[in-house]
Structure formats: C-alpha cells, structure tokens
Amino acid sequence: MPTDRAPQPDLTTSSWSHRRLIARFVAKRSIDVVGALVLLLCAAPLVALSAVAIALHDGGPVLYRQVRIGRHGEPFTIVKLRTMVRDAEARQQSIADANTRSGPLFKAAHDPRVTPPGSFLRSACLDELPQLWNVVRGDMSLVGPRPALPGEVAAFDPHHREQRHRVRPGLTGPWQVTPDAHDDFAAYRALDLDYVAEARIGVDLRILVATVALCVRRGRATLLGETPTTSEVRSTPDIIDLQHRSTTDAGEADPVGHGTPALARTGTGG
C-alpha cells in the first residue's frame, strides 16, 4: 500500500558539482585571507627594513602604486615596494630595444632603472609583500595569473582576456615558478588558461611552496653575488599539466570555483 514520503533532494550531478565549486571558493578565499594576514604580520619587520633601505638610497617614495586589471576586467591599484628610479616609466621607451619578452609583455635584462636595494628586493620577492593587503581586500588571491597592465590586457586575444577575468589575479602563479616560460608569451598564455581551467587548492599550495623556495634561492644567490641558472629553479610540469588547450577546452573553465562569491614582473616603476 503506497505511503507518503518526504520529497527526496535533487542530487543531480549538476547540483553536486555546483556545491563542490562553492566549497572550493570558500576554501580558497579563507586560505587567502588567513594566509595574507599571517604573512603580513610576519613580514612587517622585513617591509620596515626594506622601506628604510629604499628611503636612504635616494630619498624617494618607498611605495609604488600602479593600476592593474583584476577579476571581471575591473581596474584596481596594486602597491609594491619601489625598486626602480623615480622616473622609471618615463625612461621605459629609451630601453624598448632591450625587451627580452615576446608579445605585449616587457622585461629588460639588466634593467638600468633598477636601484641597488631594488635588485635585492626583486630577487627575494620582498617588493611584492605589500600586495598581501590587496589579497585581504579581495582585489587579488595568493595564487592566480599575475595582474596585467591595462595596455597588456588590451593586446590579449578575446579568449585569453575572458578566461583571465574569471578569476582574481594572484600574488604568485604558475608562470612565476616556470622559468622556461618567462620570455615566451605563448607559454604565458597557455599557463594562464590551464590555471583557470585546472587549478585546485592542492595546486595553489604547491605553487606557494615552489614560490617560497624560488625566492629564497634567488635572494641567497644575490647576497652571495651569484646568478641563479634556470636549472637551479624548479619547473612545474607536475603542478599544472600544460596541455596548451584548444579554445574549446579552455572555454570550459569554471567561472565559479575561483571567481564567484569569489611574479610576472612588468617593465615599469616597481
């Protein structure tokens, strides 16, 4: 004889997938906020010493601010410790021929605009520490594609731009720990698209560990007057499987997992 039963919840694949994505977002954002606050507290003495070194060198401003493009294509202002001369942006055109990168990115080998204290701050990644506040604010994540300049974003192809804008940009990302890709814009693009499509919390944690190891090695090498070679820096084929996806594959990237209820280095200024 039939009996009344409570309606069963809709446990469809789509429903479970959505829940997993929301849980992933909550976990990622929690790690971002807690991790950034802890790192800010621990890094405060280093930031203070770095600020003194910058001020004593040329008496200029300690911080450098620059507009970058974030999630959903929204501009925001990043804050860095200044590592270049005060008129670095005005001088960029004069060293345009020294650019070692392809595509819209700019990087000059042995950039003459970098100051002596700035050289060490860059090698040890200390100049990026103020961006931890951008992470706390929600402008950035600890891990993600590095925030690009408006001019760089304008030169990206539509698919690359759309996928990048699904996630918060990161303090570090797969490109920072994949040295073989540093001068190749095609590799930069592939890393961005693969990260958006494939990244998980475990991947983020491995990228963070690889970033810390890289910065420590580079800072030590600079102090000892050495030049780290590519072979001394860990590459990351095991962190993200670089399949150089087609547009269709990359278009399946999840807009929720990193971007809902949520150290490419540029050639200027910082």
Image: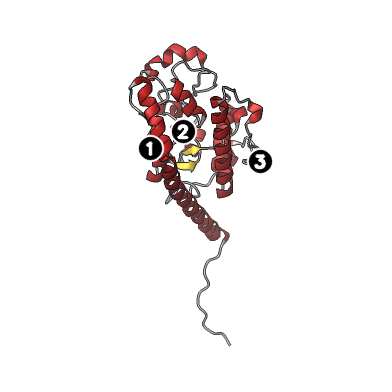
Residue 229 position in % (x across, y down)? 63, 25
Nearest to the observer: residue 32 or residue 61: 61
Q: Which mark is residue 126?
A: 2
Q: Is residue 12 left or right of residue 269?
A: right
Q: Is residue 175 visible?
A: no
Nearest to the observer: residue 88 or residue 26: 88
Cα separation, mark 1 vs mark 3, equals 32 Å
The residue positioned 61% from the left and 26% from the top of the image is 228
Cα separation, mark 1 vs mark 2, equals 26 Å
Q: Which mark is residue 29?
A: none
Q: Is residue 95 visible?
A: yes
Residue pointed to by mark 3: 238
Q: Residues within 10 Å of mark 2 (few under 14, many from 20)?
A: many
Q: Is residue 90 left or right of residue 241?
A: left
The residue positioned 49% from the left and 26% from the top of the image is 120
On screen, residue 236 above or below 84? below
Q: Which amino acid type corresponds to the residue marked 1 in the rendered image?
A: Glu
Residue 26 position in % (x across, y down)? 47, 54
Q: Is residue 189 left or right of residue 134?
A: right
Q: Give the mark, 1 or 2, whose residue is nearer the N terminus.
A: 1
Nearest to the observer: residue 199 or residue 73: 199
Q: Residues within 10 Å of mark 1 (few under 14, many from 20)?
A: few
Query: Which secondary structure, mark 2?
Result: helix
Residue 68 position in % (x across, y down)? 40, 32
Q: Give the mark, 1 or 3, whose residue is nearer the N terminus.
A: 1
Q: Which amino acid type corresponds to the residue marked 2 in the rendered image?
A: Leu
Q: Which mark is residue 74?
A: 1
Q: Give the mark, 2 or 3, whose residue is nearer the N terminus.
A: 2
Query: Which secondary structure, mark 3?
Result: loop
Query: Which secondary structure, mark 1?
Result: loop
Cα separation, mark 2 vs mark 3, equals 26 Å
Q: Quadrant of the C terminus?
A: top left
